[in-house]
Structure formats: C-alpha cells, structure tokens
Image (cartoon, rainbow, N blue to C red):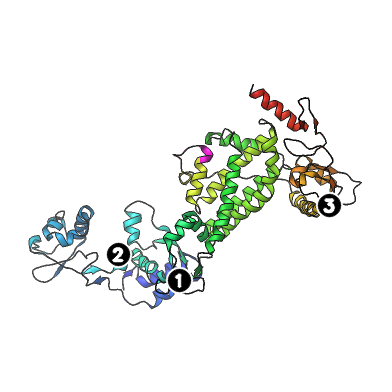
Amino acid sequence: ALKSDDKSLRELALNAIANDINFVPDWGQNRLRGMLESRPDWCISRQRSWGLPIPSFRQENGDVFMTTASIKAVGETFATQGSDAWFKSSPVEILANYDVKSDPEAPEGLKIETLEKMYDIFDVWFESGSSWNAVLNERNLGYPADLYLEGSDQHRGWFHLSLLPSLGVNKISPFKTVLTHGFIVDKNGRKMSKSEGNAINVEDLLKQYGAEVCRWWVSTLAFENDIKVDMSFFKVASDSYRKIRNTLRFLLSNIFDLDVNEANAEKRMQLLSQIDPTSINSYCLKKLTDLQNDVKEAYSEFKFKTASTLIYDFCNDTLSSLYCVAVKDRLYCDAKNSKRRIETQYTLWQTVDTLCHLLAPLLPHTADEVFQALYNNKNESIHLKTGQNIAFETSNDWDKLLEIRSEVLKSLENSKEQGIENTLDAGILIGKESNLLSAFQDDLADIFTVSRVTITEDATELSVTDLRNEPRCERSWKRDSTVKERENGSVLSDRDYDAFQYSESIYK
C-alpha cells in the first residue's frame, strides 16, 4: 500500500473519514469506513479496447518507459488533440513536447522513435475518481469540493475512489461533505423498470407538470431513504407550487405603481425600519425575518424538505390566510399616496425580494422570472445576486392578538346561521384584552376582516354586530360609521371619498 508520512493510504483514508469529512446523513460515515477497512489492493490498470490510456511505452529491451516529464508531455498532446491521439498518432507525435535531455528520469540512450505504445487503460473508477483534479483544480473552481452528492451505491464507487487518489497526491480529502440520497422506486416500493411496466415516462411527466413542479416535488422529499413515486404524487406538488406562484403574483400585482429599483434598497430598509410594531406590516416583516433565518439554516444542513415546508407555510398561512387578506382593502381603496398603502407596498416589495432569494435553489426558473418582473429587467438573474439579510422586530403581543382573531373568526363563522354571509356586513364588539387591542386599533378591522371593531370594557364577551341595515360603501363594501351619500350621489366612507377626490385631482 502507498505510504505517506509513515501512514498507508488506507490509514490516511480512515483518518479523513473519522475527522475531516461531514456526512449527510450520518450513517454514510460508517458505510464508507466499512468499504475502506475491507477493500483489497487497487489495480488501476485494465486491458480493454476502450478507455483512457495509461501513457506508458515499451522500449526495445522490453522495459516500460513512463516518467513525470513524459506524462506531462502526453497530457499536453491530449489537451489539444484529445485522448484519441494515443490511438491515432505515433509515439514521436504524442511526445512532441517531450525533451529527453531535460528529463533526469529518462533511461540512458532512450530513442523516442523506437518506442512502442502500450494499450492498457485506466480503471474507469480511477478516471472518474480523479475528476477533482480535472474539474476543480484545472478550472480553479475551488479544491477541495464543498460537496460530493450521489446515491448510496457510491460509497463503494465514486466517493470511495475519489478519496484515495486525492489523499495519495495531496494528502487531503477531495470533498468536505458527502451527501447520500436514496433511489427512486414505484409507489409500492419496487424497483422501477420498463419490463415491469412501472416506470414513469419523463417526457410525459414534464409535458403534464413542467420541470419546476418536478423540482418542487423533489424538494419536499426525505432524500435519505428510497423515494416512492407515482404520477398522482405530482398533482399534490403541482397544487402547492401553484399556491406559491399565485402568492407571488398577488404580491407583484400590488406594487405595479411603486418605483421599484434595486438602487432604492437602502431607502426601502429605512422606511420599513420605522413601521409601527403594532402594524400588520411589522408582523409580516418579522415573520419574513424568521423565515429567512430558518430557511438559510435548513439549506446549510441540506434539509431541503424543511426549507420547502417553511416557504410553503409562510406563503399559505402568514401571507394568503392572514396578511394578504388584511391588506387588500388599503391596497385597493386607499389613496395612492397614503402612508399606510405605501408602507404596505414596501413590505410587499421586501417580501417578494426575500422570497425570490429563498426559492432560488429550489425553483430556479420561477425565482428568476419573478425577480426579473420585480425589477423589470430581463437581463438580471437572481442567481448572480446576493440576498439582503433582514432583521425586523415586532410587538410581543401579536401571538395573543392572533389567538383573539381565531375566536373572532369562529364567531363570524357561527354568524352565518343568522344570515351574515359577508364578514364586511359585520362588526365586532369586544371588551376582552381591551388595553392590548387598543394598541392595534388601526388595523383591527382588517385583521378581523370586518367593517368595524368596537373595544369597550363594558362588553363581557366577544359578540358579532349585524350591520346589514347600515349603508355600505360602494367602493370598499365596508359599512363603517362614516359611510354616507356624497354630493355627487355616490355612497362612500370618508376614506374612500378622500381617495376618490385625490384620484380625480391627479387625472385632471
């Protein structure tokens, strides 16, 4: 066995496995160690009619000629002509860049023209196991690699047989982390094959669902084990992908009139940092901050299923079920230049930007498409941009407020029995936690999705007020206490009337 610093190549490998390599999942360490402990000596030459030739020549006396300098000369020829030069060219042509006089290892009296090519090839595993040099070193991509990723069979193959040449040449592992995934099997756990008739036609799959849905499906899997697959599984992935895409479309569509430009990122952060901690925007930004931190941590640990779940839950629960519902009214009905509408639009802007960066590893094309639409620049790619780290805080009372919101929503659901189908036809009378609720007064009606919220210590329990007999704003459909008929015959709330007048003034 090859010796280095009084250690065999096997000992170097076992030491690297124990101390220098991170394994995902952990059991990969024992599997690779077992392969190295029991492996026989490795004969790297093969006698085949195809493959990468070992650059050795036979001399007239039968001895083998192969030195450091001659190997480099052959490599230079291969670099310009390809390895087929070994089979097409003469030894003189192959060694055109070799100078026998400057080679201290050259045998005495060597005559290049008398050499005969030998036709042993490298074991294909030695060839692929040396890719760290051809790919990383030669192209200056960074060596050792941050990650080698393959199926569990490669503990015997590529992982194992990349480690040995790198240790032999450079005394270091070619990879810092090894990630092992399972194999695709059918929905019953059987190996997929055409003869069994249980294989999936990839062309049909991509035609029906598209590559992004397939990528999203992969991101939702526990890759450490074998993965069951059936065409029906992609329907679920398609639905969740559509939820994310539609959420992003809603966010984008509501900042259509905002002057969005990357150069304004500093201005955006300055404005967002001044938002009141009891604002629904503040809550969204805090949840966005938590999402960014949690997803980045998941990525760093290769927990892609965790990352995709976090992103989906944020889009489905925080945005679609709460935030987007709460801010629709101000986005649609506030005056274009109103403070809370602009704050909300800046919040949407930050949310889209952050989501694009978090989604980019999982949905590269979707993230790029949204990013380019956000900044109206088809020449920019999110994959060449560094995401902005955010750190927003909010009121500590939001958890309690959302508990109360759940009670309100239940009461509104029950009020359907009294004929109140549209929650904007209702008001809420509440005395519970009056001090806490008062701090959130400006956003309460939107958070509860009603027309008005009355906070009074006299109320002993939460109740729904039927407002169907009160006038309804023709613009927002709200029945707040300011709705009345205006001089032009319209029935509007004070907010909507002011917004209408503002719109009239800017279009005159």
Residue under the point 51% across and 47% down: 367
Magenta-highlighted stretch: main secondary structure? loop
Label for residue 294? none
Q: Is residue 20 shown left or right of residue 424?
A: left
Residue 91's spot in the image, x, y percent?
A: 12, 60
- In this rendering, is residue 396 above or below 187? above
Q: Earlier in the sequence, mark 3 or mark 2?
A: 2
Q: Amino acid at mark 3?
A: Gln
- Nearer to us of marks 1 and 3 is 3
Which quadrant of the figure contains the N terminus?
bottom left
Label for residue 418? 3
172 or 226: nearer the eye? 226
- For label 1, the residue is 198
Q: Is residue 232 shown left or right of residue 139?
A: right
Label for residue 127? 2
- Nearer to us of marks 3 and 2 is 3
| Magenta part of the chain | 373-380
Q: Amino acid at mark 2?
A: Glu
Residue under the point 39% across and 72% down: 156
Q: Earlier in the sequence, mark 1 or mark 3?
A: 1
- In this rendering, is residue 346 above or below 201? above
Q: Quadrant of residue 164?
A: bottom left
Dot 2 lies on which element?
helix
